[in-house]
Amino acid sequence: MTLKSLLSVTLIALLCWACESPATPAASDTPTDTPPVEETPPDDRIPLPLHGWYATSTASDSDLKSGFDRDAQSAWLTIPGAGPDEGVMLYFADNTYLESIQIEVATGPGIAAVKMIEIYANGSPMGIIAPGETFTLGENYRNIYLRINEVQRTRSLPIKVDNPYYDTFLRHEFARDYQTGFANVRLMGREGEYRVVPPIAIAGRVQATSRLNPEQAAYQESHLFDARREFGWVEGADGNGIGEQLRFQFDLPVQMTHLQFWNGYQRSNSHYKANARLQNFTFGTDVDSMQAAYQLADDPLPQKIRLARALSGRDFALTIASAYRGRSYQDLALSELLFFDEDQAFVIDSDYPEQLQRQIKTACTGTVLGQLLDRRVANTYTSEAGAREDLSAIMRSDGTFVMYTKAVDELGTSAQTLADGNWEIIEAGPESARLRVFGKYLNFSDLELYYQGKTEVELTRIFKDEITISGNTVQGKKYLDAVVFR
């Protein structure tokens, strides 16, 4: 049964149920004063298909759809204690014209209202807006990221730091028992407001015959369906992964007509070239005696392939037949995968992310990391001459991290950097810990020069560092200056 068939069966059942209910009460029925139920008006917004979307933090009783559904009574909310520097990413299925963006923020008991939001388009910072303001874009974009910049219930406390260049030091702390989020995000095009349409998520699981260490978070096969291009599955067998297999199991029967791949490790161009990429493979149902063969180009752009024939079932398998060699590593990487039943995109919705978060939280319990998990640590340094530096970092319970720096010197020249990726524990105790972090590093000054045609530098670089947490300070060896968190 196809996805469309499943939706049709559900719709017919609802219509039959409605037909069996009497339209008007019989003469013998006792009249009541119950007011008529108001019908929900049809959603006449323009459909905007997505290849994927995600939030960096979502409460267990919330979901991302609630921030885009026009319903002022529902909202996407972060987990308690997570606020500034969290955000929402949308990947459009096609290059899409955006006229403007407007954001209504969540309010209510236990919710700290967002005060400012920073907008990124195609990876570049576009500007900062307040709730309710209309931010004009007027261009075509492939993706949009909405980063929470300032939030209520954040206090700034003076701290002592040994730094002769600055005069004032502040530590920023968001309330541990408060959430924040978006009640409604409005995306406007030329013809009106868009209605985002993400891929359908169907319960199931994906299993690989191998994965590269560290297995806990960084290279898990479930990353194929998390919409994060910067994460993916990396096989862990000897060589380029020839013969390794991915098995996809759905709780419901589905039909497939196409597959769409984001080949290689798409964290950056450097990551893509450094690792092996998928070249030839076979794909079919688990009962196929002979699976059909397919080939991908050595290209980081999304590649959509029509299957040799439509496949129906619950179990499917992909087997690696050959690979494009990596410049630095033999391990084959694959970042994202979408299934299609004609035009309808769908993905596997597994319970692995929840399992992973439980494992990480358990590992951090009783250690200094328990105070930092899912909480931003941030400092601001200022001088009398007008120089300023903002530093922040988050170690999330899903095994990801993000670090921002923004500096402005006495002449007003600014520089902004971003590092994000995965983290893992080297050692952790009640008073100190050491973490390994790895991912991408982006200097936005390089990005601006690149778009001006003034530089040929690699915009995003492979990033590795070791983070030490001791006393009240988080300190990186290479990239992160000391940040005081208590």
Image (cartoon, rainbow, N blue to C red):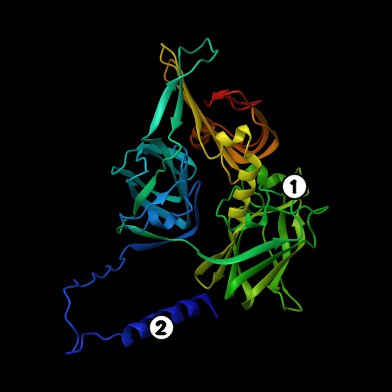
Q: Is residue 336 visible?
A: no
User: Mark 2 highlights which residue?
Assistant: 12
Binning the other alpha carbons within 10 Å of mark 2 as few (below 14), some (14 to 19) or many (20 upward) gives few
The circle drawn on residue 213 is 1
Residue at (41% x, 51% y) in the render: 76
Amino acid type, callout 2? Ile
397 with respect to 215 (left or right): left
322 with respect to 447 (left or right): right
416 with respect to 26 (left or right): right
Residue 363 is drawn in which quadrant?
top right
User: Where does the image place residue 357, in percent across and percent down from the top left?
Assistant: 60, 49
Q: Secondary structure at mark 2?
A: helix
User: Where does the image place residue 469, in percent across and percent down from the top left?
Assistant: 63, 28
Precedes in sequence: disc 2 or disc 1? 2
For the image shown, how many numbered marks are present on the structure?
Answer: 2
Q: Are marks 2 and 1 in contact (CB under 8 Å)?
A: no
User: Where does the image place residue 118, in percent across and percent down from the top left?
Assistant: 41, 38
